[in-house]
Image (tube, rainbow, N blue to C red):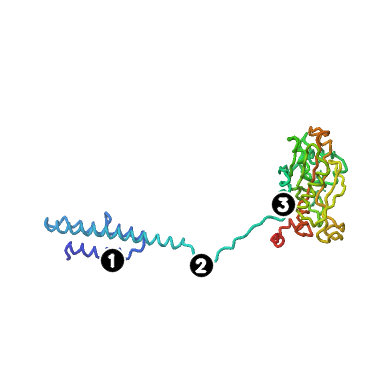
Amino acid sequence: MPSLAETLRELEEEARTALASVADLEALDSWRTTYLGRRGRLREVTRGLASLAPEERRQVGALANRVLEELEAAFGERRRQLEQEALARKLAEAALDVSLPGRPLLRGRLHPVTQTLRDVLAAFAALGFQVVEGPEVEWDYYNFEALLIPKDHPARDLWATLWIDYRRDGEMPMLLRTHTSPNQVRYMEKHRPPIRIVSPGRCYRYEATDPTHEWMLTQVEVLAVDEGISMADLKGTLAEVARRLFGTERRVRFRCEYYPFVEPGMDVLIDCFQCRGEGCRTCGQSGWIEILGSGMVHPRILANVGYDPERYTGFAAGLGIERIAMLRYGIDDIRLFYQNDLRFLEQF
Ligand code: YSA
């Protein structure tokens, strides 16, 4: 039968071989329990020390201590190795493969109507106009009544209206604004002249669509009120903005027009880019495309907001931004703007 010392050496040998084949931290833990744990193999062997003679017990006891210390040290060393291997594996999994082709960067751009809107606002800003906004869901009062278009007035038909199906006792009807002109009154109610503002936004009309008409459109309202403002200021301002937007080559036409909230009223038209004035489908055979309505603010509107119409005069205009974009980019049908066809939109 082998001596205790021999058994200890054999056990050390066996433990080292087993330690070398431990593959991960979990297996390492169970190795430690098996060989060095309180009920482990080494403890089992050293229990036999009690039956040895004192001298032999001292020698074999020292040997057992050395085996324990060395196996503890070997365990620590193996744990460090395994931890490093685990970290290296983790890093390798997370590493970037720089040889993979990159994902293409999609370059966004502004919608042609937004681009044009910004250019229009910039042209007015250069002339000293400030930008203010108003609500898209509007009261009947601001959209019509305050602009001298009372209930049952035939001029209401000029703005085919989308009404909001909502009514509370005592409250006036609500609608999707048909133009940006309500912002004239909203602004004048809260401010005193001198006024130079532009007010951009979406408008909505219950309208059959065609190459120059959409049911949703973008307008920019223009309002200037001061002492001594005349029709010459209106024409000069609009001609200058048209020059900035279209250059000096295009022809601009001023045409008398009726709007209940101005006196006198006038439209501005630009020669059709498609037929250069000959008449075609895009311009409805007229040779011209109307881009805005305008006029001198009616004295009764000025009086209604508390201004003295003997002292102050003003001009106003409402520009159709889609129409201006059509003329600038040569687009022959307004309906292309809101069909979300990328083949169309990517051209701008
Ligand atoms: C008139 C006088 C003022 O003192 C101030 C503003 C105005 C304009 C008035 N509020 C108005 O809305 N007139 S309008 O019905 O002729 O529209 C103005 C412009 O919007 C038109 O010249 C056109 O460029 C554009 N527009 C009108 N209806 C449109 C449209 N664009 C696309 N689709 C439609 N359905």
Mark 1 or 3, which is nearer the eye?
3
Distance Cα–Cα, label 1 vs label 3:
81 Å
Q: Is 140 placed left or right of 57 in the picture?
A: right
Please, what secondary structure does the residue beneath circle 1 have?
helix
Where the C terminus falls, by quadrant? bottom right
The percent coordinates of residue 191 (x first, y second) are 73, 35
Q: Which residue is mark 2?
A: 99
Residue 177: quadrant of the picture: top right
Q: Which residue is mark 3?
A: 119
Where the N terminus falls, by quadrant? bottom left
Q: Amino acid at mark 2?
A: Ser
Please, what secondary structure does the residue beneath circle 3 have?
helix
The percent coordinates of residue 262 (x first, y second) are 84, 41
> In terms of depth relative to the viewer, which is nearer, 244 or 288?
244
The percent coordinates of residue 75 (x first, y second) are 29, 59
Question: Which tag, 1 or 3, sits closer to the chain's start?
Answer: 1
Q: Amino acid at mark 3?
A: Asp
Image point 87% across, 45% down: which residue?
A: 258
Question: Which tag, 1 or 2, sits closer to the chain's start?
Answer: 1
Residue 275: quadrant of the picture: bottom right
Q: Looking at the rendered structure, which numbered label has been put on residue 202?
A: none
Please, what secondary structure does the residue beneath circle 2 have?
loop
Distance Cα–Cα, label 1 vs label 2:
42 Å
> In terms of depth relative to the viewer, which is nearer, 34 or 177?
177
Respond yes or no on whether mark 2 lies under 8 Å from ligand 1: no
CB of mark 2 within 8 Å of CB of mark 3?
Answer: no
Give the answer, above or below, for where 73 lies relative to 136: below
Respond yes or no on whether mark 1 lies under 8 Å from ligand 1: no
Question: Which tag, 2 or 3, sits closer to the chain's start?
Answer: 2
Q: Which residue is mark 1?
A: 17
Estimate how packed mark 3 is, as few (under 14), some (14 to 19) or many (20 or more) residues with alpha carbons within 10 Å: some
